[in-house]
Image (cartoon, rainbow, N blue to C red):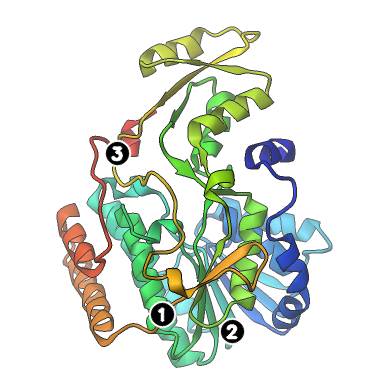
Amino acid sequence: MDQKLMARVLGREKSIFAADLTSKHQQILEKIRKSRIVVTGAAGSIGSAFVRLVAAFKPKMMYLVDPSENNLVELVRDLRSNPDTNCNFQTLAIATGTREFEAWINTLERCDYVANFSALKHVRSERDPYTMMRMFHTNTAAVADMVDFMASVWPGSNFYSVSTDKSVNPASLMGATKYLMEQVMVAASDRIHVSSSRFANVAFSDGSLLHGFLKRMEKNQPLSAPNDVRRYFLSPEEGGELCVLSCFTAGNGEILFPSLSPAEDMMTFDRIAVTVLEHYGLRPIEFDDPHEAAEYARTRKSDDAQWPCCFGPSDTSGEKDFEEFYTEEEQGKVDLKRFSGIGIVHKDMLSFDDRTRLGLTLEKMQILRNSGKWTLDQIQDIVSGAVPTLSHIKRTKSLDEKM
């Protein structure tokens, strides 16, 4: 990744978590050095950033689990090529929530930490009932199975799973699955140590819109972005740092989030697109019609300093206008003092009613999945009944219908 471009987009060259990593270094070192650690989703953008940081502390053993063979191979090459990260680890190309994963983890000697990065994170995955069921199974049900296993077989162990800002007052089913994941973890916090972090967008991570800007330019295609959606951004390295701090220093039931300023740090995607173009000596030429933009790109000369762009209001389902890291109800439980660049939300134990509703939701979804036939409306009805703060934003299009 072009670090100058990253710094230009983020508006900073130094990690916002640098001071916290320095102050917590010894605590993190002592915990990692003596630990056996399972990392699921280890080869994704954030999982691999986490793994590289943890590897430098030389854990007793790491098990790196990811269904992507190619990404896993690349991660192995990275770790083995650097003396600082060449530690004891094994890899498995399997996915969480599968029979293969269940069979494997039952053979393991007790591990001290499980860090989970397996997730379907795109709102576009709500487009059909089958992908949506996989999303619920991966984001929520598989986490419930994991914490139940750890509580019964590895009591006193530590579970970390990455969440998202979209779990706060969710406007999408994706956000709702992460809200439920947080509830699953809180429900287990009387049996194992749990912690999480609510993420901002990770700049240029695989599959992200910013990553898409670079791919569109590589393929000589127009840039397309909403001009009314504001987001916070972290670098992949900052993402890994937040996860390490959350996994190894957070208290039981705590959720960490980046302490960012709405006025200074929140950006629109069209502004970022222009910044990317300017970095490469280009400027945007805007089109209302995506077909005209595509035709301009097709016939564009290599020395043309203009790049076709389509910017406009968001008209896709499930997209919030802005990010938030905690609810009004949680505001009184937010700690902005313990860390320099991080805020903390402490989650209370679930009430009897909430715990009962969560259990029924997991049971209903399992029955529906086992039936072998379901609709998107059925999934939405079950999830909506369990997430009182869900306000699903239904618009005219899904992201798969957009350029």
Disc 2 target residue: 111
Question: In the rendered image, which quarter contains the N terminus?
Answer: top right
Quick check: 42 left or right of 392? right
Q: Name the residue: 68% across, 23% down.
A: 280
Residue 95 seen anywhere in this rendered image of the structure: yes
Residue 373 seen anywhere in this rendered image of the structure: no
- Which numbered disc, 1 or 2, marks the residue closer to the eye? 1
Position of residue 314 measured from the top left corner of the image (x, y, whole percent): 35, 34
Front-lying residue, 125 or 223: 223
Q: For numbered disc 3, what is the local secondary structure? A: loop
Tell me, yes or no, whether the two marked residues, 1 and 2, touch with CB atoms within 8 Å: no
Position of residue 294 measured from the top left corner of the image (x, y, whole percent): 43, 16
How far is the residue under mark 2 from the one under mark 3? 41 Å
Numbered badge on residue 159: none
Tell me, yes or no, whether the two marked residues, 2 and 3, touch with CB atoms within 8 Å: no
Amino acid type for the residue under numbered disc 1: Val
Amino acid type for the residue under numbered disc 3: Ser
Disc 3 target residue: 398
10 Å neighbourhood of mark 3: few (<14), some, or many (≥20)? some
Q: Name the residue: 33% across, 65% down.
A: 137
- In the orientation shown, which residue stands out farthest toward the right? 83
Front-lying residue, 197 or 87: 197
How far is the residue under mark 1 from the one under mark 3? 32 Å
10 Å neighbourhood of mark 1: few (<14), some, or many (≥20)? many
Q: For numbered disc 2, what is the local secondary structure? A: loop
Along the polypeptide, which appears first: circle 1 or circle 3? 1
Amino acid type for the residue under numbered disc 2: Cys
Numbered badge on residue 186: 1
Report which quarter residue 82 is drawn in. bottom right
* Vertical side of 74 occupied by 219: above or below: above
Question: In the rendered image, which quarter contains the C terminus?
Answer: top left
